[in-house]
Amino acid sequence: MIVNTLEPPYYAVIFTSILSNDISDYQKTADRMEELAKLQKGFLGIESARNEIGITVSYWESLDDIIAWKNNIEHTEARNLGREKWYKKYQVRICKVEREYSFKDN
Amino acid sequence: MIVNTLEPPYYAVIFTSILSNDISDYQKTADRMEELAKLQKGFLGIESARNEIGITVSYWESLDDIIAWKNNIEHTEARNLGREKWYKKYQVRICKVEREYSFKDN
């Protein structure tokens, strides 16, 4: 799902990843993390797509909200498992969204 | 392909989209736009994934570079075609990348 127009400034975490060969339990944990993220303070939305690489963008009200989510215990455990098992490589980028435009076909 | 670590601050354009039912010539134009973007001043990299939605993130040295690319004539024509034909909906977010982290399995 595309996240509808939000009011800048707000923050985005761009997470791009390549999975390893062992992805047992990956989808279950990814779904759980998305569910858990939605419960966090300052969460604004999340977008995901994957084919050769995966891109997940989550949107947040503030940098502090991103840090609090990073420090969430269950998220930290999932991230550790991710590094041990599921991910061959990933990149995390923390961004301030300054402007936004949208188009919708009528 | 994942774009390797860059040096913040730099800029990102997050483009999320849902395609319409008519995607004739879409991939050809998308490939051409990626090729053309790579030739622009200030271009740093591009990442793409699509299943239910498409997410393309392009990275740029400055906001001015993003504006110049937006105003490129061939890009403008492709965008017009995109609105007429290929996209049911899209969202464009212009962001300043402030921090970044990476992981690579050894």
Image (cartoon, coloured by chain):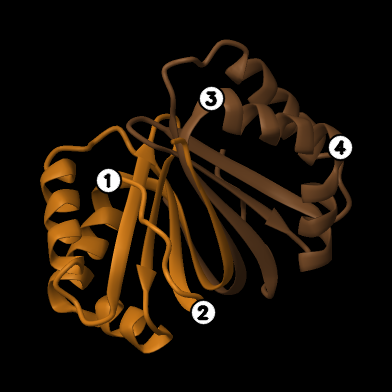
Chain colours: A orange, B brown
- The residue that mark 2 highlights is A9
Residue B47 figure quarter? top right
- The residue that mark 1 highlights is A86
Label 2 vs label 3, nearer the camera = 3
Q: What residue type is labelled 2?
A: Pro
Quadrant of the image containing the N terminus of chain A: top left
Q: Can residue B62 be seen in this view?
A: no
Residue extending farthest top:
B24
Q: What element carries label 3?
A: helix
Q: Residues at marks 2 and 1, common chain?
A: yes
Question: How far apart are labels 1 and 4 at the CA level?
Answer: 42 Å
Question: How far apart are labels 4 and 3 at the CA level?
Answer: 19 Å
Question: How far apart are labels 2 and 1 at the CA level?
Answer: 33 Å
Q: How many marks?
A: 4
Q: Which amino acid does label 1 sit on?
A: Trp
Q: Residues at marks 4 and 3, common chain?
A: yes
Mark 3 closeness class: few <14, some 14–19, many ≥20 residues within 10 Å: many
Label 1 vs label 4, nearer the camera = 4
Say which label, 4 or 3, has the lower sequence index. 4
* Rendered location of residue A18, percent (x, y): 41, 41
Q: What subunit carries mark 4?
A: B
- The residue that mark 3 highlights is B86
- The residue that mark 4 highlights is B73
Q: Residue at x 33, y 38 (%)?
A: A20
Q: What subunit carries mark 2?
A: A
Quadrant of the image containing the C terminus of chain A: top left
* Rendered location of residue A13, percent (x, y): 43, 66
